[in-house]
Image (cartoon, rainbow, N blue to C red):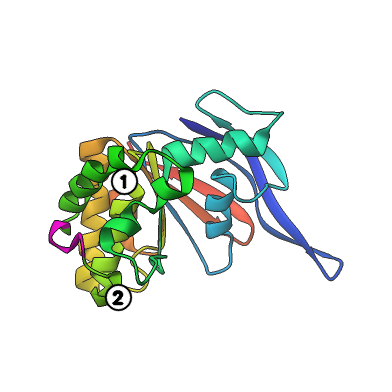
Amino acid sequence: MIEIFNLSKYYIINGSKKVLFEGLSFEIKESDFISVTGESGCGKTTLLKIISGIEYPSSGYIVYDGFSPKFFRDFFISSFRNKNIGFVFQTFELLEGLTVLDNVLLPVYISGDFIPKYRERAIEVLNYVGMKEYVNSDVRILSGGQKQRIALARALIKSPKYIFADEPTANLDEKNSLEIISILEKINKEQNVGIVFVTHRQDVLDYSNKIIHISNSKTYIEEKK
């Protein structure tokens, strides 16, 4: 579980304080499907970056599986992120010129893990998202919906506890958007992976068991039973 306590983020711009959000506390469990919603620029993506240790909060703290490191913080969170969090972005973030398989294995290459151990896993997750037949294809030939499926497979490669999805349907048409949402719901239900989904879509909000609303620097958490 990831526990967020009294989190705030602000910037000083030309001598003025710009607050994105403040006083935000909630939990992310492996069974959760959490939506983060709010107007453009309110801090939704920043919140994901803070939770995953890519950015620092202005105040507050985060506890990862019972640990809140005071020493070697960056090393601890980087290790936790690499083992436990998969990412899906609206712009796919795939490397053109590489095959589908190599793109799925990118987190493994970056972490320096033993590649042969993950090749079978890569085929497994590609099959899970319906892209096994493209395993040796160059990602440049794929449609937007297919690229996002590859991004989902990449997020799953190391069997994460959580997936952070930053508006993954923003650049897709409605048909492909619904397919990506369906796969994320399937991952949440079948694999017990916690999903944190930045979105404006009502259908995603309806499915979520927890919704974080950010508006005018204020936060409101809606929990469903």
User: How many residues crowd around disc 1 within 10 Å: few (fewer than 14), some, or many (20 or more)?
Assistant: many
User: How many residues crowd around disc 2 within 10 Å: few (fewer than 14), some, or many (20 or more)?
Assistant: some
Residue highlighted by disc 1: 156
Residue 154 appears left or right of 78 = left
> Can you name the residue that lies furthest to the right here?
15
Residue 223 appears left or right of 215 = left
In front: mark 2 or mark 1?
Answer: 2
Residue placed at 47% from the left, 41% from the top?
Answer: 82
Residue highlighted by disc 2: 140
Residue placed at 41% from the left, 39% from the top?
Answer: 113
Residue placed at 51% from the left, 35% from the top?
Answer: 80
Q: How many marks?
A: 2
What is the magenta segment's predominant secondary structure?
helix
Q: Can residue 159 be seen?
A: yes
Q: Secondary structure at mark 2?
A: helix
- Name the N-terminal-most of marks 2 and 1: 2
Residue 180 appears left or right of 209 = left
> Can you name the residue that lies furthest to the left here?
133
User: What kind of residue is marked 2?
Assistant: Arg
Q: Which residues are magenta?
A: 132-136
Which quadrant does the N terminus fall into? top left
Residue 4: percent from left, percent from top: 57, 37
User: Within the magenta stretch, is there residue 113?
Assistant: no
Residue 115: percent from left, percent from top: 34, 43
User: What kind of residue is marked 1?
Assistant: Leu
